């Protein structure tokens, strides 16, 4: 692909007396005719991937936004606009690109190997933060398709003596659902395809925004806002404004702009950047340290913070207009190479705003800083601070529409996957299950919160087996344990410690709905020799810190968030190639789907069959709902003969895993979970399920995996636990992948067992 740059050029200039006036200049009369708002600009720019050399889509969007300025784009991609003539000649620049990866090899089994762009200059944890995450992969046609980065499955790790390192590029694989290199290439994916982490802009309390590439886009947003209020007729001299490509890869766009013309002044508007190690301090490097909410930042290579020349002039203008401004460290704009660098203007400055968690998916900025930045640019051009900006708010949740009659297993799974329901908070899932059941089903809820559906009654002669089929409704989550003085939530894992969530977006669920948040990284995360602490439960383990945008306990209280609320990670159902899909909490949404789909296949209650379906609670906390139900049924003398626990078969079907254990490929059928950490199915019953599947032409596998299952809670009371599952890649992570053919096979065997076992 070609590499595109974006630049806007305007001709105009402002007399020094106007620029440095204490009182703001008169309001602009003629506006720039750019629709939208700062928030809309940020959402659109963040949503558009643009790694170095692949900024075309973003470049074209900005060019289209500036059509009224008669934009021109050169062969590198610079989009230029010129108004006026003469001096002084000024340049305002903002960057476009973001870090990411390119495809370096398509493997025979359909997995993709990658190389990072840029290859240097990022925190050591950057690669790790892609592990087990949803990503977007660019195709040769310019479209983006969904994929995930492979991650180690949690339940298989005790069997590893030397597990793969998630930060090692040699152990990094992208899964787009392809089963072969031919299938991947047929989808338009090939060497050099760009790959970026999936992104959605989160809006935190206090006007804070978080998401991947936020720190790479705020400069462009500030320029669009400046142009939105620009009155070109009142700009004197020549002003060139440029959004440039490849600042992460040598600053090539900026070098071209500076080489093409000579300027008297330049303002570069973008993130402040770290430098090298501090001499004599092996574990410390120079980096910006100002927090979001500080105001406008002026980047300085020296460490004493002193301002002189053009920087001092900008500060004086900001101070005169009550715009908060402060200096901070930033390295050079153009890295040294074997070629001589371009000539910088005699007067230039690097300005930006504070970015927390830079180069992660949790990058966070304060909108007040962004407004101050745009206002300073307006004042620099002889204007004044703009009036209150328009706020648009987030979009509404997707409406799936009415449920088809009958629904397919995939349709049921799509609806159940997006429901949030951590352990002890299964209410939303109870409602969701009820909404997809056939009308003839009559669900009941017991004291443990389990949803119970009796499928029929025992035959009059008392013969026949009593069968119970169970799948759990809960997913792993995080509990709010306390609220710190700085407004962060201190939290603890509920249902197992996960390593795939720090440095990413989060959702806090409370009485007033859900709040966007970020899962903060530990102290020292950006230092060269950082090591992950042990998070979560247990004495001596660090509590998780969650940022909802509040900066005091009082602000947290105003949001309606309190101790005992729960936290999850955002999720979606994403179709991949073929019959495969990605979505967090397939464990155990697939099991619930199988039970619901089997009920639709029955068409009504079973005759002379003692069958009960159960959607259980608290499985991730230790089979809580199943345990209480098992004890109650035994006390009543109603314990079943057989329990079919339907849960994940954590599969080693991944290039990161050893196939010695849990080898059940996705797409090859449901799995009899013959041995796991909580149960061993009698071999004759494994064979019976396999025979029943073959007789009904249902693809089946069987094997050994990790983890436990709800059925094991019943065994002490007499029943036999025959655990069933489906093969799942990258368990308990945002990258979970299933093959929907396995979901269909699982639903079919549940139906057959209910009717014929």
Image: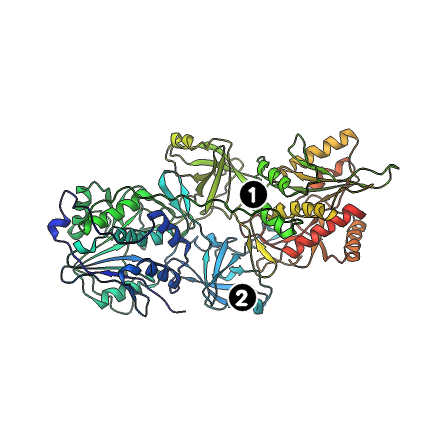
Residue 686 visible in the displayed image:
yes
Q: Nearer the viewer, residue 754 or 505?
A: 754
Q: Position of residue 540 (x, y in %)?
A: 50, 36
Seen as rendered, the residue at the extreme left is 17
Above or below for 227 versus 74: above
Q: Which residue is mark 2?
A: 187
Above or below for 370 versus 76: above
Total residue callouts: 2
Quadrant of the rendered image containing residue 77: bottom left
> In the structure shown, which secondary structural element does the residue marked by tag 1 occupy?
loop
Tell me if mark 1 has few (under 14), some (14-19) or many (20+) residues whose alpha carbon lies within 10 angstroms of its own.
Answer: many
Q: Which residue is mark 1?
A: 419
Q: Nearer the viewer, residue 743 or 565?
A: 743
Q: Position of residue 60 (x, y in %)?
A: 36, 62
Q: Quadrant of the N terminus?
A: bottom left
Residue 274 visible in the displayed image:
no
**Mark 2 or mark 1: whose residue is earlier in sequence:** 2
Q: Nearer the viewer, residue 422 or 165?
A: 422
- Asked whether disc 2 touches disc 1, contact meaning CB atoms under 8 Å apart, the reply is no
| Residue 342 horizontal side relative to residue 574, left or right | left
| Residue 262 horizontal side relative to residue 339, left or right | left
């Amino acid at each position: 692909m070609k590499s595109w740059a974006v630049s806007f050029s305007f001709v105009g200039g402002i007399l020094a007396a106007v620029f440095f006036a204490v009182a703001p200049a008169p309001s602009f009369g003629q506006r720039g005719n750019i629709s939208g708002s700062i928030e809309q600009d940020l959402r659109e720019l963040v949503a558009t991937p643009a790694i170095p050399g692949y900024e075309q889509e973003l470049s074209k969007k900005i060019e289209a936004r500036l059509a009224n300025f008669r934009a021109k784009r050169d062969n590198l991609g610079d989009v230029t606009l010129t108004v006026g003539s003469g001096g002084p000649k000024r340049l305002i620049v903002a960057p476009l690109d973001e870090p990411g990866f390119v495809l370096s090899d398509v493997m025979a089994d359909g997995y993709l190997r990658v190389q990072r762009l840029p290859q240097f200059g990022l925190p050591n944890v950057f690669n790790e933060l892609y592990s087990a995450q949803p990503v977007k992969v660019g195709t040769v046609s310019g479209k983006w398709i969904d994929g995930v980065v492979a991650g180690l499955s949690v339940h298989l790790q005790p069997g590893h003596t030397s597990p793969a390192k998630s930060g090692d590029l040699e152990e990094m694989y992208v899964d787009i659902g392809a089963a072969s290199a031919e299938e991947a290439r047929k989808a338009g994916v090939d060497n050099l395809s760009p790959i970026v982490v999936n992104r959605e802009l989160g809006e935190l309390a206090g006007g804070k925004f978080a998401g991947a590439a936020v720190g790479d886009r705020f400069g462009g947003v500030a320029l669009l806002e400046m142009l939105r209020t620009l009155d070109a007729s009142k700009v004197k001299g020549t002003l060139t404004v440029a959004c440039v490509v490849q600042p992460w890869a040598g600053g090539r766009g900026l070098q071209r702009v500076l080489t093409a013309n000579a300027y008297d002044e330049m303002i570069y508007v973008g993130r402040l950047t770290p430098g090298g190690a501090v001499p004599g301090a092996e574990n410390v490097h120079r980096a910006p340290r100002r927090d979001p909410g500080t105001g406008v930042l002026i980047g300085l290579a020296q460490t004493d913070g002193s301002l002189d020349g053009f920087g001092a002039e900008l500060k004086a203008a900001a101070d005169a207009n009550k715009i908060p401004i402060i200096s901070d460290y930033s390295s050079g704009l153009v890295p040294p190479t074997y070629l001589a660098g371009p000539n910088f203007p005699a007067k230039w400055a690097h300005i930006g705003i504070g970015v927390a968690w830079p180069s992660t998916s949790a990058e966070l900025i304060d909108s007040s800083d962004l407004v101050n930045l745009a206002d300073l640019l307006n004042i620099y051009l002889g204007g004044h601070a703009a009036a209150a900006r328009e706020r648009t708010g987030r979009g509404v949740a997707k409406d799936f529409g009415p449920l088809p009659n009958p629904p397919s297993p995939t349709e049921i799974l799509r609806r159940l996957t997006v429901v949030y329901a951590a352990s002890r908070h299964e209410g939303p899932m109870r409602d969701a299950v009820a909404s997809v059941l056939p009308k003839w089903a009559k669900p009941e809820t017991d004291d443990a919160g389990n949803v119970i559906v009796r499928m029929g009654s025992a035959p009059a002669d008392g013969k026949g087996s009593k069968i119970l089929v169970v799948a759990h409704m809960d997913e792993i989550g995080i509990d709010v344990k306390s609220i710190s003085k700085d407004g962060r939530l201190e939290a603890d894992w509920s249902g197992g410690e996960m390593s795939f969530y720090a440095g990413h977006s989060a959702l806090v669920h409370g009485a007033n709905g859900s709040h966007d948040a970020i899962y903060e990284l530990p102290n020292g995360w950006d230092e060269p020799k950082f090591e992950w602490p042990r998070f979560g439960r247990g004495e001596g383990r660090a509590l998780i810190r969650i940022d909802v945008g509040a900066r005091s306990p009082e602000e947290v209280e105003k949001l309606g968030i309190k101790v005992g609320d729960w936290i999850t990670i955002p999720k979606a159902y994403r179709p991949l190639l073929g019959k495969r899909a990605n979505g967090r909490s397939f464990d155990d949404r697939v099991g619930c789907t199988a039970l619901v789909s089997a009920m639709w296949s029955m068409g009504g209650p079973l005759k002379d069959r003692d069958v009960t379906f159960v959607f259980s609670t608290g499985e991730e906390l230790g089979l809580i709902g199943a345990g209480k139900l098992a004890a109650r049924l035994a006390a009543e003398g109603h314990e079943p003969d057989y329990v079919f626990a339907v849960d994940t078969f954590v599969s080693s079907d991944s290039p990161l895993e050893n196939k010695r254990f849990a080898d059940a490929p996705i797409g090859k059928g449901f799995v009899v979970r013959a041995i796991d950490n909580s149960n061993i199915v009698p071999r004759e019953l494994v064979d019976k399920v396999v025979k029943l599947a073959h007789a009904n032409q249902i693809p089946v596998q069987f094997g050994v995996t990790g983890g436990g299952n709800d059925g094991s809670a019943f065994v002490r009371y007499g029943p036999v636990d025959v655990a069933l599952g489906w093969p799942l890649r990258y368990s308990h992570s945002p990258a979970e992948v299933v093959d929907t053919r396995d979901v269909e096979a699982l639903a079919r065997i549940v139906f057959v067992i209910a009717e014929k076992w």
